[in-house]
Image (spheres, rainbow, N blue to C red):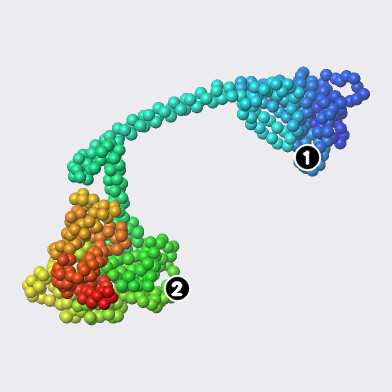
C-alpha cells in the first residue's frame, strides 16, 4: 500500500499543476474555479479559504483539507522546493493522503487517539475523521496523558487513555515487580545462609572472650559489638598493609643509600612497587636535626614526601627521634635545584646539612657520604661520643635505633656502611666503633667479646659485627599469623599498656612489642602512623610529664627517677634535660621561685 494517493508538481509562476497524466491550473486542480459549477472527478475539492497558506513566506510544509482524495476525504501536503525562509515559494511538491490511509496508520491502536493540526486548525483525528470532528469524541481522554510533536505550524498529538496503561503498561510492570521480588527473596536467603556461616566462627571467638568484656543484653547489642570488632580488625588490616608498604620502601631506600643499586629489571620493579621512583636524574641527601625547632622545614619536607610531584620526590628515614635523613630526587635543571638547596641551607634556626647534587641513582651513596661528612665536620655528635670528624656518629645512631626497633633493614644498612669504611678508619676510631657497636648489640657482654679478640684489624672487626648481627638481630620478622593480640585501632590498648608498665625497671619497647605479638619495628611504625610521633619519644614525654608532676609535688630527683623506672639518676637527668632544656633540680628550684 502506498502512503500517498497522488504526487504532483505545482509551478507558482506559471500557475500550473503537473500530474502524471495532465497539467491543470491550481484553481482547477483544487476546485477553486469560480466560473464552473462542477469539476472533473480527478479534481480535488479543497477549502478556498486555505489558499493563503500557499502564498505565505517560508519553507515550511503546508497542510490543507480536501474532498475527493482517493474517493473520500483527505489531506493535501504542499512542500516548498526552495529553502529560502524569507520568500514566498516558487514551486511545490503536492502530496495527497486520504483519511483512510491515516486511519490505518494511526487509528488501530486501542486506547490511543491521534490528532493532526496545522496552524492550530484541526485537520485530522483518529477518532473523528475530518478536522471538524465533534469535540465530545475526545472527552474520554480528558484525564489522559497527551504527548505532542510540533514543527513550523504542524502539530501532532498522541492521547493515551488511562485504560491503555492498565491493559499494556501495568501488566508489564507487574511482571517485572514479581521477577524482582523473586530475585530479592532468593538473594536474601543466600545472604542469610552466608551470614550464618560467617557468624559462627565469630560467635565461637566471642564465647572465648572474658565475660566482663561482653556486657550485652540482647542480640542487637551483640551484633553492635561484633560490628565494632570487625571494623576494628578491618582498620588494623589497613594500617598493617600501609605499614608493610612503608617498611618495603624503607628497605629499598637503605639499599640505595648504601650503594647497593642493581640495574636488573627485578630491582627496578621492586623499587617502583615500594613507591620509589628511580628514574630521576639528580639526587641529594639532606639531614635535618632537631626537627621540633627546624623553623617549619620538617613540615615542609613531610608535605613534599606525601605530595606526588611531576618533577621531584622526597623520601625519608629516621636516624633517631629527633633527626631525619631525606633523599631528594628531581628532574629539574641543575641550576634551579642548587638555588633551592642553597635557600634551605640559609634557613635560620634550622640545623640542616645538604650534600652536593649527584647524577643517577647509582651515585646516591656519594651524596650520603658527603652529607654524613658535612654533619661530622660541623660537630654533629652527641654528648659522650667521640668528637672526631671521621667517627661514624650517623651510622651508630642508625644502628642504635635499629636494635631498639628490631629493624633488620636499618641495622644491615648501618653495619654495611661501617664495614665499607672500616679500612679507612684510624686505629682509634676502629676501637671506638667496635666498643660503640658492641654496647649497642650486646650491652654489658660487649667487653667480654672484645677481650676475647686477638686481632683488631679492619677485617676482624667486620667479622665481629657480622657475628653480632646474626646473634642479636632476629633472622626474620614475626609473621602475622603468630600475633597474640590485635593492635587496637584507637591505640587505647597501647596507651593503657604504657601507663601500666612504662615505670617498671625492665620495661622495653621490644618486650612491649612481644606482648602484642609483633616486632618492635612494626609496632613503632603503626604507632607513628596513628599519632605522628615515634613510640620511644612518646614514652619519654609521658615519663617526663609524670616527673614534672612528682617534682612539683615535692618528691626528690632520685625518688622520681626510681619511681619512673630509670636505671640511674644521671640517666633520668639526661633525658629530662634533653626534653625540657633544664635539669630536674633546676626545674624544681625554678618552680619554687615562681610560687
Count of numbered circles on the image: 2
Tag 1's secondary structure? loop
Q: In this view, does 486 lie above or below 279?
A: above
- Up/down of 211 relative to 427, above or below: above
Q: Is residue 67 left or right of residue 534?
A: right
Dot 2 falls on a residue whose secondary structure is helix
- Which mark sits nearer the N-terminus, 2 or 1? 1
| Residue 544 in view of the camera | no
In the image, 87 versus 264, the foreground residue is 87
- The label on residue 324 is none
Q: Position of residue 51 (x, y in %)?
A: 83, 31
- The span from disc 2 to disc 1 (Cα, nearest Å) is 69 Å
Q: Which residue is drawn at 32% across and 66% down?
A: 316
Residue drawn at the location 40% of the way across and 62% of the way down:
307
Above or below, 523 against 290 in this view is: above
Residue 296: quarter of image:
bottom left
CA neighbours of label 2 inside 10 A, class few (<14), some (14 to 19), many (20+): few
Q: Is residue 545 left or right of residue 297?
A: left
Figure check: 518 above or below 24: below
Residue 498, percent from left and from top = 21, 59
Which residue, given by chain and number where applicable, does mark 2 sit on?
336
Residue pictured at 42% horizontal, 67% vertical: 331
Q: Are marks 2 and 1 in contact (CB under 8 Å)?
A: no
Image location (x, y in percent) of residue 101: 70, 22
Tell me: 309 left or right of 574. Answer: right
* Quarter of the picture holding the C terminus: bottom left
Residue 71 position by quadrant: top right
- Sort mark 1 into few (<14), some (14-19) or many (20+) by Cα contacts within 10 Å: some
Which residue, given by chain and number where applicable, does mark 1 sit on? 58
Specify the quadrant that holds the N terminus.
Answer: top right
Where on the picture, by quarter, is residue 126? top right
Residue 567 visible in the snapshot: yes
Amino acid at each position: 500500500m502506498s502512503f500517498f494517493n497522488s504526487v504532483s508538481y505545482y509551478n507558482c509562476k506559471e500557475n500550473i499543476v503537473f500530474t502524471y497524466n495532465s497539467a491543470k491550473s491550481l484553481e482547477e486542480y483544487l476546485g477553486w474555479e469560480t466560473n464552473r459549477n462542477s469539476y472533473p472527478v480527478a479534481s480535488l475539492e479543497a477549502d478556498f479559504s486555505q489558499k493563503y497558506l500557499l502564498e505565505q513566506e517560508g519553507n515550511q510544509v503546508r497542510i490543507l483539507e480536501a474532498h475527493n482524495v482517493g474517493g473520500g476525504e483527505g489531506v493535501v501536503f504542499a512542500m516548498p522546493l526552495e529553502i529560502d525562509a524569507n520568500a514566498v515559494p516558487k514551486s511545490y511538491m503536492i502530496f495527497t493522503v486520504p483519511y483512510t490511509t491515516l486511519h490505518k496508520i494511526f487509528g488501530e491502536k486501542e486506547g490511543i487517539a491521534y490528532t493532526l493540526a496545522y496552524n492550530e486548525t484541526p485537520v485530522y483525528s483518529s477518532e473523528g475523521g475530518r478536522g471538524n470532528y465533534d469535540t465530545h469524541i475526545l472527552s474520554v481522554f480528558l484525564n489522559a496523558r497527551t504527548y505532542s510533536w510540533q514543527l513550523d505550524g504542524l502539530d501532532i498529538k498522541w492521547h493515551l487513555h488511562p485504560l491503555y496503561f492498565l491493559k499494556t503498561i501495568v501488566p508489564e510492570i507487574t511482571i517485572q515487580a514479581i521477577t524482582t521480588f523473586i530475585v530479592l527473596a532468593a538473594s536474601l536467603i543466600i545472604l542469610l545462609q552466608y551470614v550464618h556461616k560467617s557468624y559462627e566462627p565469630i560467635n565461637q571467638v566471642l564465647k572465648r572472650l572474658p565475660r566482663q568484656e561482653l556486657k550485652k543484653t540482647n542480640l542487637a547489642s551483640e551484633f553492635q559489638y561484633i560490628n565494632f570488632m570487625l571494623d576494628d580488625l578491618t582498620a588494623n588490616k589497613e594500617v598493617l598493609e600501609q605499614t608493610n608498604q612503608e617498611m618495603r620502601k624503607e628497605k629499598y631506600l637503605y639499599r640505595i643509600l648504601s650503594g647497593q643499586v642493581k640495574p636488573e629489571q627485578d630491582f627496578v620493579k621492586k623499587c617502583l612497587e615500594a613507591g620509589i621512583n628511580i628514574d630521576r636524574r639528580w639526587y641529594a641527601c639532606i639531614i635535618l636535626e632537631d626537627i621540633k625547632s627546624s623553623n617549619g622545614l620538617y613540615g615542609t619536607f613531610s608535605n613534599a614526601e606525601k605530595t606526588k610531584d611531576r618533577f621531584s620526590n622526597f623520601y625519608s628515614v629516621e636516624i633517631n627521634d629527633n633527626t631525619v635523613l631525606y633523599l631528594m630526587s628531581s628532574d629539574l635543571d641543575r641550576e634551579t635545584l642548587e638555588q633551592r638547596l642553597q635557600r634551605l641551607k640559609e634557613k635560620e634556626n634550622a640545623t640542616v646539612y645538604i650534600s652536593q647534587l649527584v647524577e643517577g641513582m647509582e651515585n646516591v651513596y656519594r651524596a650520603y657520604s658527603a652529607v654524613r661528612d658535612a654533619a661530622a665536620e660541623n660537630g654533629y655528635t652527641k654528648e659522650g661520643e667521640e668528637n672526631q670528624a671521621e667517627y661514624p656518629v650517623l651510622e651508630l645512631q642508625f644502628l642504635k635505633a635499629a636494635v631498639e626497633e628490631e629493624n633488620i633493614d636499618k641495622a644491615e644498612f648501618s653495619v654495611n656502611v661501617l664495614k665499607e669504611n672500616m679500612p679507612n678508619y684510624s686505629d682509634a676510631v676502629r676501637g671506638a666503633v667496635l666498643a660503640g657497636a658492641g654496647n649497642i648489640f650486646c650491652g654489658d657482654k660487649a667487653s667480654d667479646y672484645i677481650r676475647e679478640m686477638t686481632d683488631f684489624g679492619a677485617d676482624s672487626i667486620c667479622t665481629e659485627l657480622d657475628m653480632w648481627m646474626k646473634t642479636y638481630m632476629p633472622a626474620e620478622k614475626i609473621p602475622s599469623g603468630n600475633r597474640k593480640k590485635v593492635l587496637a585501632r584507637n591505640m587505647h590498648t597501647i596507651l593503657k599498656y604504657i601507663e601500666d608498665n612504662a615505670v617498671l625497671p625492665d620495661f622495653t619497647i621490644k618486650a612491649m612489642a612481644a606482648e602484642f605479638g609483633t616486632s618492635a619495628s612494626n609496632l613503632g611504625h603503626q604507632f607513628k602512623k596513628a599519632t605522628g610521633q615515634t613510640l620511644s619519644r612518646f614514652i619519654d614525654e609521658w615519663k617526663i610529664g609524670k616527673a614534672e608532676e612528682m617534682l612539683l609535688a615535692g618528691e626528690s630527683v632520685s625518688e622520681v627517677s626510681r619511681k619512673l623506672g630509670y636505671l640511674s639518676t644521671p640517666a633520668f637527668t639526661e633525658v629530662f634535660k634533653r626534653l625540657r632544656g633544664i635539669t630536674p633540680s633546676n626545674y624544681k628550684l625554678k618552680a619554687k621561685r615562681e610560687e
